[in-house]
Each structure stands twice: as structure tokens, then as C-alpha cells.
Image: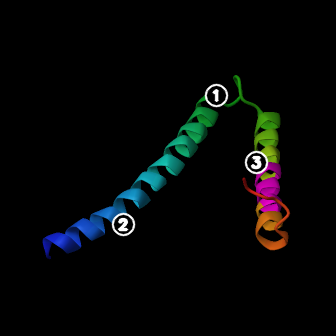
Amino acid sequence: MSKNLRAVTFSIVLPRVITLVAVLVPLSATVFAMVQLWHRQFVFVDLVLLVGLYLLTGFGITVGFHRFATHRSFKSN
């Protein structure tokens, strides 16, 4: 493999690895904390609130992006 091809491959792979770590580490830490604290400081109601608010946030982001991309409702400065 040539030196230039390695540099290109590294520049493509590194950001993907960083993104993967940035997404998986907090998620894994949250799941680990939930398992360790179950029935002590974390109960079923907390899990329902976590999932519900996560879905509402994701829906809000999706609607906002749709409005921006499709209807051009938001103007950037």
C-alpha cells in the first residue's frame, strides 16, 4: 500500500472511529449506571421518562430539520 493511500485511508477512518467512540461511550456508561443503580436510585419511572424524553427530543430535532430543509422556514445569518 502506498504512503499516500495510507494517509487518505487514515483521514477517512479516524473521524469515523472518533464519532463511534463519542456515541458509544456515553451510551454504554448510561446503561451501566442504570444497571448498577436499578431499584436503589433508578426505578422504572426513570426509565419511562428517559425513553419518553429521548423520543420527544428526537422528534423535535427531526421536525426542525424537516422545516429547515424542506420549507426553508429558518434563515441562517
Residue holding disc 3: 54
Q: Give residue 12's mark.
A: 2
* Left or right: residue 39 compared with residue 29: right
Residue 24 placed where, x, y %?
51, 49
Badge 3: residue crowd in 10 Å (few <14, some 14–19, many ≥20): few
Give me the residue at 47% from left, 54% from top: 19
Q: Is mark 2 on a helix, strand or loop?
A: helix
Quadrant assignment for the N terminus:
bottom left
Give me the residue at 49% from left, 44% from top: 25
* Left or right: residue 20 compared with residue 37: left
Residue closest to the far front: 77
Dot 3 and dot 1 residues touching (CB under 8 Å):
no
Name the amino acid type tagged 3: Tyr
Verify whether residue 59 appears in magenta.
yes
Dot 2 and dot 3 residues touching (CB under 8 Å):
no
Most foreground residue, 63 or 4: 4
Name the amino acid type tagged 2: Ile
Q: Give the range drawn in magenta.
A: 56-64
Residue 4 placed where, x, y %?
19, 72
Verify whether residue 7 appears in magenta.
no
